[in-house]
C-alpha cells in the first residue's frame, strides 16, 4: 500500500474523487497556545486490487518535535473490492479525509503526522506551528 497525503484548509470526497482546497500546508500561524490546528488531512490510498478487500488498521499519530504525542486516531478499514474483471495487479485508489479542525496543538514548534497501516509507517508529514512573525510598522525603518 502507498499513501499520498497533504494538510489542507478543507477536503471532501464525492463519487470517489478527492476535492482539496488550500492544499500543501507546511506552516500554520497561531496567536496563542494551546491552539486548534484548523486543518484537514487529505489522503489517497493506493494498493493492488488483489489486496483491496483485506481488513486493515490505520493509525494517524500527531506529535510535537519533543516527541510529545498531541493526538492519535485509529481506524479499521477495508478498501472496496475491485470488480471481478479487474486484474489483481491493477492499482485501486481510495480517497480519505481526516478532520483536524478542532485538534489542539499544545505549543509552538515542528510537528509530525505519521500515517501507519497495519503497524508500518507509510507516510510522514512535517509541518511547523508558530506565532505570526512580528510586522514592522510602515515608516519605522532605521537608516
Image (cartoon, rainbow, N blue to C red):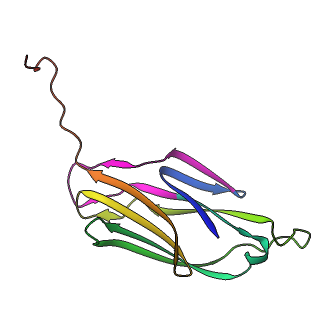
Question: Viewer-proximal residue, 45 or 29?
Answer: 45
Q: Position of residue 59 (x, y in %)?
A: 49, 76
Q: Answer whether residue 142 is magenta in the image.
A: no
Q: The N terminus is located in which quarter?
A: bottom right
The residue positioned 34% from the left and 68% from the top of the image is 63
Which residue, as the protein is rendered here, is positioned at the far right? 85
The residue positioned 38% from the left and 63% from the top of the image is 112
Q: Which residues are magenta?
A: 17-41
The image quadrant of residue 135 is top left
Q: Position of residue 45 (x, y in %)?
A: 64, 65
The residue positioned 35% from the left and 57% from the top of the image is 37
Which residue, as the protein is rendered here, is positioned at the far left? 142
Q: Is residue 131 left or right of residue 70?
A: left
The image quadrant of residue 114 is bottom left
Q: Is residue 85 left or right of residue 20?
A: right
Q: Answer whether residue 36 is magenta in the image.
A: yes
Q: Is residue 76 above or below residue 97?
A: below
Q: Is residue 7 above or below residue 99?
A: above
The residue positioned 63% from the left and 57% from the top of the image is 13
Name the chief secondary structure element in magenta.
strand
Q: Is residue 135 above or below residue 6?
A: above
Amino acid at each position: 500500500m502507498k499513501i499520498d497525503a497533504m494538510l489542507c484548509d478543507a477536503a471532501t470526497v464525492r463519487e470517489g474523487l478527492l476535492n482539496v482546497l488550500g492544499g500543501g500546508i507546511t506552516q500554520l500561524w497561531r496567536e496563542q497556545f494551546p491552539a486548534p490546528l484548523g486543518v484537514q488531512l487529505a489522503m489517497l490510498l493506493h494498493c493492488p486490487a488483489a489486496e483491496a478487500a483485506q481488513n486493515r488498521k490505520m493509525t494517524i499519530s500527531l506529535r510535537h518535535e519533543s516527541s510529545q504525542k498531541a493526538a492519535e486516531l485509529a481506524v479499521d478499514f477495508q478498501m472496496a473490492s475491485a470488480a471481478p474483471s479487474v486484474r489483481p495487479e491493477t492499482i485501486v485508489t481510495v480517497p480519505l479525509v481526516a478532520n483536524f479542525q478542532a485538534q489542539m496543538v499544545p505549543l509552538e514548534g515542528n510537528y509530525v503526522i505519521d500515517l501507519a497501516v497495519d503497524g508500518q509507517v507509510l507516510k510522514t508529514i512535517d509541518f511547523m506551528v508558530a506565532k505570526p512573525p512580528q510586522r514592522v510598522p510602515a515608516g519605522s525603518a532605521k537608516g
